[in-house]
Image (cartoon, rainbow, N blue to C red):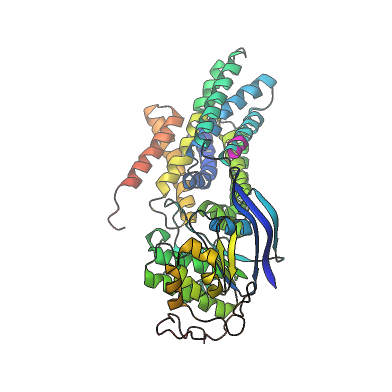
Amino acid sequence: MPEDFLIRAALAGLGLTLATGPLGAFVVWRRMAFFGDATAHAAILGVALALATDLPVYAGTLAVALAMGLAVSALAGRGQAADSALGVLAHSALALGLIAVSFLPGVRADLSAYLFGDILAVTGGDLVWIWAGAALVLALIAWRWQALLTATVDEALAQASGIDPRRERLVLTLALALVVAVAVKIVGALLIAAMLIIPAAAARGPSRSPEAMAGFAVLFGALSVLGGLALSLRLDTPAGPSIVATAAAIFALSLLPRRAG
Amino acid sequence: MQLITARGLTVRHGGQVVLAGVDFTIAKGEIVTVVGPNGSGKSTLLKALIGLEHSVEGQITRAAGLSIGYVPQRLHMDARIPMTVRRFLSLPRRVADAAAEAELARTGVAGIGPRPMSALSGGQFQRVLLARALLARPEILILDEPTQGLDQPGVAAFYRLIEEVRAETGVAVLMVSHDLHVVMSATDRVICLNGHVCCEGAPRVVSEAPEYRALFGLGTGGALALYQHVHDHGHDHDQATGHAPGHGHGHSGHAHHHHHEGTDA
């Protein structure tokens, strides 16, 4: 009989993958991989600010991740320099976050939990946050699905159909910030990007439609969570990295040539 | 009834003026073709009229609730988006299977629905784009060099298709083209662009205008005469007005100028 903390960890991971699956598909389609990275990095600054001001960690990460997303969106709209601008923002936010935390007595140990996550330490309260956040992100994406998809296929095509591509980009930024805010405590900032990208990238192979790809991304994410936790339990490996390693294994399997195709 | 009207349209790209003081109008059911050398602002004009350009001066008036069917010059669809033709037709508005199939048949790619977009040839892709644009039941089709990458028969067939669609649905068509001689025969009005409007009017009027000849050379004039069908029953020099769709074709006396004879009888 699995122990409670393990069930909570599994539930947390499954809730997370509900959001990162479809969102990850957009991250892959729109080549936003580094964008997810940057937002996750910035979350560390949010954690530091929240700890310093006695605000809830979720609020701090949400605010900073959102600000980061908006800044990057604004930069991306202005030309090709977005890539390096993103790098500058991401790494300086992470560095500033680490420096800010060093001024706070006694939280150094805590911070590594936010960097690498501690899914085995998830509480019942965390679960509520995660599932609520995931449901919100899912609802947001489902609501905007057709418009998001059209704007992702081609922005000019979307605009000619009366869709504002900037608004759709904003929706994705908001969703990404939400996911980062609720997930930073579970898989950690450094591993969120991996959970966004790897299952979605693995889902491309077997998918014939965008909807199928989002579905497969959720499925592969869920398998990664359960497989990773099992691995972690068996081999006594760290849980977060085990989940990502499992996802990577699934991705590698998806690359195997399919004769029937 | 004018669908889109622009007055004194000036568009800049990074401080550089791409279009200066362009006046433009297109009426219901009219086919207008924009020609001009590379970098003359043809695509920019189309994008500005749709609302895709950011630094635009001047006035653009679109008819209230105007529905636009846009076929872009190129569609950079990431191959990582798994997308069948059928699914693509339902973007952004979902359409019924019967309507999707009918539109694919009309544009000459019947039964292509289950194929992935990434597996289409250039000609099939353009036709699917056109089918998708038509499914929105637009009042105006805006096509930016729709025949890029098509061979010569493919180009002729595409313009024939555009004329057929116009005859059937009464949709207005605004397009950019490089295929001067072919397009001249399938259009009511030509706008010759080179950062500004050089000349404008019925195809034959434009083809004989000194500004046009200065841009495209005299040689083209001969080719034009060959392909031209006569739109000039009594209003040859009627510069800015279009012709009603579906009127009969006159003959200019050349033996083989009618590559689309009988398509809109």
Q: Residue at x 52, y 35 (%)?
A: A81
Residue A218 falls within the magenta-colored stretch: no
Picture layout, residue B174 above or below residue A52? below
Q: Position of residue A237 (x, y in %)?
A: 40, 27
Number of marks in the image?
Answer: 0
Residue A160 in sight in this render: yes
Q: Residue at x 55, y 44 (%)?
A: A19
Q: Where is residue A204 in the image (x, y as percent from the top left)?
A: 41, 50
Q: In which quarter of the image is residue B235?
A: bottom right
Majority secondary structure of magenta residues:
helix
Q: Where is residue A47 in the image (x, y as percent from the top left)?
A: 61, 25
Image side of residue A130 versus residue B76, left or right:
right
Q: Which residue is drawn at 47% across and 73% down?
A: B159
Find residue A246 and report its horizontal and vertical position in percent: 39, 37
Q: Foreground: A62 or B132?
A: B132
Q: Is residue B57 above or below residue A192?
A: below
Q: Residue B10 or A26: which is nearer the viewer?
A: B10
Q: In this view, does A132 lie above or below B29?
A: above
Image side of residue B90 versus residue B122, left or right: right
In this view of the protein, can residue A4 be seen by the observer?
A: no
* Residues in magenta, as a range: A70-74
The front one of A132 and A199 is A199
Quadrant showing the N terminus of chain B: bottom right
Q: Residue furthest left?
A: A259
